[in-house]
Image (spheres, rainbow, N blue to C red):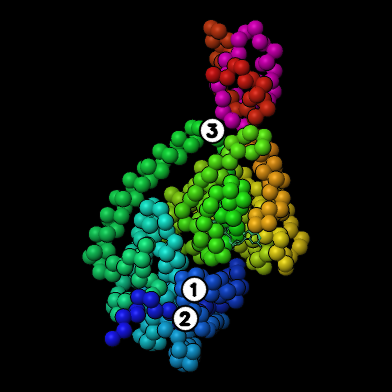
Amino acid sequence: MLYETEKQVEKVVLVAIDTGDGEFDTESCLDELAELAKTAGAEVVGRLIQKREAINRATYLGKGKIEELKAYIETVEATGIICDDELNQNQIRNLENALDTKVMDRTLLILDIFAQRARSAEGKVQVELAQLKYNLAHLTGRGKEMSRLGGGIGTRGPGEKKLETDRRNIADRISDLNKELKEIERHRNVLREKRLESKVPVIALVGYTNAGKSTLLNTLTGAGVFAEDKLFATLDTTTRAVETESGAKYLFTDTVGFIQKLPHNLIKAFRATLEEAKYSDILLHVVDASNPMRNEQMNVVYKTLKELGAEDKPVITVYNKIDKDGVQKPLLKDPKALETISISAKKEINIDLLIQKTEEIIKSFKQSIEVLIPYSEGHLLSIVHGNCEITKSENRENGYYFELYADEETKNRLQNFVI
Ligand SMILES: Nc1nc2c(ncn2[C@@H]2O[C@H](COP(=O)(O)OP(=O)(O)OP(=O)(O)O)[C@@H](O)[C@H]2O)c(=O)[nH]1
Ligand SMILES: [Mg+2]
């Protein structure tokens, strides 16, 4: 008797519907899905695309295409299929019955990768929660199927733990995890507040998965952050302090990569982590300039930022990997960004320029300060009125009191009277 199911390599056929109105063309969606499948440890043995006006609500594909797929699965000896869209439980059940094979979707795949990658306590709880919610919503379709298969994609929890598959136990586990997550979030908020209080500017690296965020953080800080040519190498945010040559201190935060069709459950589960972007002073939007889909990927990043409420953050767009062959020129200035810079994080090209531009921009931001200017220093009032945004003013016994926003230079001129 063989007990190899746990380690079984799934041989999968990728399946997509081309409705003709997606932002990405269907072939490149499947290229990405193939990368995801590989990252999850599956072997891709074929693809099938159906052109169709809309996805079939009950069976995803049309009837004829299902027949074709069934024959194809037998020919290539696939053990399962992965559809590029999130399936509902009817679609899963119907496809499984018709094809007699394991039916998975993009969401399940991403969740599986996240489960393998989660490192921190928070990441693990977030992923398991998202996985369980997904399973609960799809249970009728695959409960039996999953316990029969015993291993492979969709059955692994974070840290190789086996995922709960029983409805009652799932509900209990979800409620426990929610409690745990609340506690972790409370702790994270305390840390975040401390960081904000310290007034050290926070720079968040955001971008599409595999753009090179972690590599850039490594280059910037010499820190050993996990970087790999795999999708979603980073799941947990890492923050590192960097002191530049000018002596200024900054905190750089690496974040989880974005991807098109990021499962909604995951956005919800990862909200706290993804929100790091929202609490930063500026975003470095890292783009893989060598990727032919870079413009579409940039749009996905902006859309996701909007969903997180971080669309108003100042952005520096960083075209990365310019050392690679086949980077399509020109690299246009990103109209959504204050600056657009081309670099190579790996070959350390233009890193100094990036730091310099980032510093310049941060210094031009206004900070909130309180000053008390003695009546004898009345000449400083023209600076206050000319350069600052005043939010409160009072004539006090020992001088003019202001609560105001000042840029770095003005703040330095008023330095002696800051309270
Ligand atoms: N040639 C080249 N490769 C790079 C450069 N920057 C990053 N890479 C490679 O791109 C791959 C992805 O880099 P990561 O730093 O892990 O990317 P990431 O954005 O953190 O990815 P996720 O955490 O998965 O979202 C790795 O194989 C890096 O070595 C670069 O400037 N040039
Ligand atoms: Mg990373």
User: In terms of sequence position, does the residue under pointer 2 or pointer 1 come before the other?
Assistant: 2
Local SS, label 3 = loop
Taking the spot 51% from the left edge, 42% from the top edge, the residue there is: 279
**Quadrant of the frame with the C terminus:** top right
Q: In the figure, 386 relative to 148: above or below?
A: above
Residues at marks 1 and 3, CA–CA distance in whole angstroms? 42 Å
Quarter of the view holding residue 119? bottom left
Q: Nearer the viewer, residue 352 or 186?
A: 352
Q: Position of residue 311 (x, y in %)?
A: 57, 49
**In the rendered structure, which amino acid carries the disc numbered 3?**
Lys
Q: Provide residue 256's location: percent of width, then percent of height.
A: 50, 56
Query: In the picture provided, is 218 more to the left or to the right than 387?
Result: left
Extreme residue toward the right, this view: 330
Q: Is residue 385 magenta?
A: yes
Determine which residue is flagged by label 2.
12
Please, what is the three-letter code of the amino acid marked with disc 1? Answer: Ala
Q: Quadrant of the N terminus?
A: bottom left
Residue at 42 percent across and 67 percent down: it is 112
Name above or below for residue 13 compared with residue 38.
below
Q: Residue at x 53, y 74 (%)?
A: 34
Mark 1, residue position: 37
Other-residue count near label 3 (Cα within 10 Å), few / some / many at <14 / 14–19 / ≥20? few
**Which disc, if any, is residue 415?**
none
- Position of residue 101 relative to residue 333, above or below, is below
SS at badge 2: strand
Q: What is the magenta range? A: 366-393
Residue type of the residue flagged with mark 2:
Val
Mark 2 vs 1: CB contact within 8 A: yes
Residue 45 in sight: yes
Labels 3 & 2 near each other (Cβ < 8 A): no
Residue highlighted by disc 3: 199
Q: Is residue 250 magenta?
A: no
